[in-house]
Image (cartoon, rainbow, N blue to C red):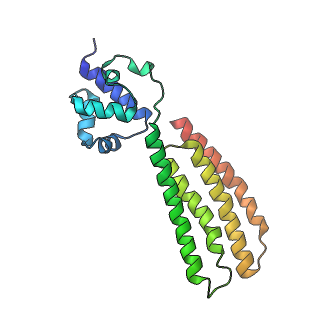
Amino acid sequence: MDTLEEIVAYNLTELRKNARLTQAELAEKINYSDKSVSKWERGEALPDLKVLTRLAELFGVSIDYFVTKDAGKQKKEFDFPKSEKLYRIGVELFAACAVWLAATAVFFSTAIYSRGVWMAFVWAVPLSMLVLALFSQKWNFAVCVIVFRSVCCWTLLAAIYLQLLVYHSYNVWMIFFIGIPLQAAIILWSLIRHSRG
């Protein structure tokens, strides 16, 4: 017969793994040490009622979920609460806006003295896509990672092409052929990561 500690340990571990959080990340979210989370997940201790309440809010389950045997069969997939998703999307967009703010600052600070300063905005596109891809990867938005990496790849090639065309009059349109294996690598890498969990 499973003890209460073992049931709580199993359910907490499953919720954390489904949310793709490490013990340290979970501990940070509830303001506890990762050692405490580790003890709970090994069944060596039980979180108190306040902690269980916080965990239930975080994972979008009831407190009963933690003490119910086979509760994981009732809830297969973790889904972040809407407020958490909105927060993460907001942070991504804010970071991308910071890139565009920097590009605007470069444009206006050099517009008087240079030709072709509009290239600052061209370079801002792949850079902002890279920032969005990094945040999406951190927060496990798998489809967004593929899209942002792909757009980053092609806009980076376009930026290099335009830079060489505008400043050196080199028409190196064949540079876009590099994008084909890069695009294949992006898709294959994403499939490999997805298959490994």
* Quarter holding residue 195: top right
Vertical comparison of 109 with 192: above or below: below
Residue located farthest toward the bottom when viewing the structure as drawn: 113
* In front of the other: 132 or 97: 97
Residue at (30%, 35%) from the top-left corner?
Answer: 54
In the image, is 93 to the left or to the right of 69? Answer: right
Q: Quadrant of the N terminus?
A: top left
Vertical comparison of 124 with 118: above or below: above
In the image, is 31 to the left or to the right of 90? Answer: left
* In front of the other: 92 or 71: 92
Vertical comparison of 120 with 149: above or below: below
* Quarter holding residue 5: top left
* Quarter holding residue 104: bottom right
Residue at (32%, 21%) from the top-left corner?
Answer: 64
Residue located farthest toward the top when viewing the structure as drawn: 1
Count of residue discs: 0
Q: Where is residue 141 drawn, in percent x and y?
A: 53, 43
* In front of the other: 55 or 188: 55
Q: Is residue 164 visible?
A: yes
Residue at (59%, 77%) from the top-left corner?
Answer: 107
Q: Where is residue 80 drawn, in percent x and y?
A: 45, 37
Q: Where is residue 120 drawn, in percent x and y?
A: 61, 73
Vertical comparison of 43 with 128: above or below: above
Q: Is residue 139 visible?
A: no
